[in-house]
Amino acid sequence: MKKTISIIGGGPAAMLLAAHLDPNLFEVTIYEKNKAFGRKFLVAGKGGFNLTHSENIDVFISRYTPSIFLQKALKFFTNKDLRGWLDSLSIQTFIGSSKRIYPVKGIKPIEVLTAILEDLKQKGVQLKTEQNLMRWNEKNELVFDSGLKIQSDITVFALGGGSWKKTGSTGDWLDIFSEKGVKTIPFEASNCAYKINWKSIFLEKNEGKPIKNISISYEKYSKVGEIVITEFGLEGGAIYALSPEIRKSLNRERKANIFIDLKPSLALEEIKDRLRKGKITEQLKNAVKLEKPKIDLLKTYLAKEEFLDVDFLAKTIKAFPLEVNGIAPLDEAISTVGGIDLNEVDGNFELKQLKDSFVIGEMLNYDAPTGGYLLQSSFSMGVFVANHLNTTHEKR
């Protein structure tokens, strides 16, 4: 007789899990709180549907904080495996100039979602919508706001994080697990804007402009990339990548001192040499090749004598100091950290306190940078747990 599996949540982790479960072993049902599946999946695709990243899997794994708990899952179902699986659904992908992976031009996010859902239907997966989990009852049944009560042989929770509430990702399930005795951690924003108290004269000239080809450092951590100047502060991949470290400093001291290398391609002495060959502003533009926002930054924040001092100016170009003193609201974050404490799950993502109950995806407490890493980790956890269940029950 087939075992019943209930998957709570209809996002990427849930769909990949269901797609890889053996239909000869299991009767699978996904319960989604919204009227349709994959709402956050579709929202993520509006700015360019970045599915994963193409870098070497060992480097890939190192991008997560912490990374060790994801190692087995990511190596079992890699970024290359994802591309192969999507290709089997007639969703071809390509590697962009940033080494990120996207569907080929012309394939829209809704088409990717439709292809995945069609695959699930062909495998007999039952898809139920408008089923919002409320609690466990005294019989250990899962109770939904529709009045539905279920008790399955195996339950997999894939309830998502706490950002983008308009997609249904509210994170309000934390209390449900806490009441069950599972340790949870409040959600915090990750991959989000950070507050900088800009001087008004600088902001008036540069709001909305990118600062490209820079490196941001915080303590021993650094990231090459670009950022965008906003009224609130800074956004962009280079600062998002330092989210775990900056967030800890903000929680501890309510500030974080970061340094921007405005010209990482040039060594300090080379910059000095170029600055000495003419008028400072002209040399910054023509010899050092700094863009206008970078020059404005230097002119606004340095005293005249500091700006005209070649040694001081060159050192500042290589390490421009900024104080971060705030973080964007949770709902404005691209992703969140927090959720189920990692110590609550074993190596197969099974809850130690609740036999035959698993937790996957963003509802676990880990950080993933932008660039397709969060999606890939969710995909990989789903496939990894599916393989574990297939293998375990095949032997019975």
Image (spheres, grey):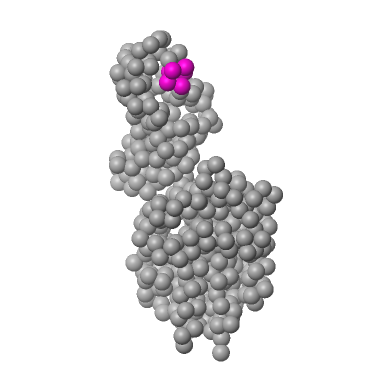
At x 48%, y 32%, the residue is: 212
Quarter holding residue 220 = top left
At x 54%, y 60%, the residue is: 82
Q: Is residue 37 above or below residue 369?
A: below
Q: Residue furthest top?
A: 278
Q: Is residue 288 magenta?
A: yes
- Compare residues 192 and 58 and report the one nearer the observer: 58
Magenta part of the chain = 284-289
- Residue 207 lies left or right of residue 302; in this view the side is right
Residue 98 percent location from the top left of the image? 52, 43
Quarter holding residue 183 = bottom left
Using the rendered image of the protein, determine whether residue 108 is visible from the camera's viewpoint: yes
At x 35%, y 37%, the residue is: 217
Residue 230 percent location from the top left of the image? 50, 33
Marks counted in the figure total 0
- Compare residues 99 and 285 and report the one nearer the observer: 99
On-image quarter of the N terminus:
bottom right
Residue 289 percent location from the top left of the image? 46, 22
- Residue 260 lies left or right of residue 48; in this view the side is left
Q: Is residue 230 above or below residue 242?
A: above
Q: Is residue 352 magenta?
A: no
- Residue 306 lies left or right of residue 384; in this view the side is left
At x 43%, y 56%, the residue is: 57
- Compare residues 240 and 300 and report the one nearer the observer: 240
Residue 116 percent location from the top left of the image? 63, 64
Q: Is residue 309 above or below residue 334?
A: above
Using the rendered image of the protein, determine whether residue 112 is visible from the camera's viewpoint: no
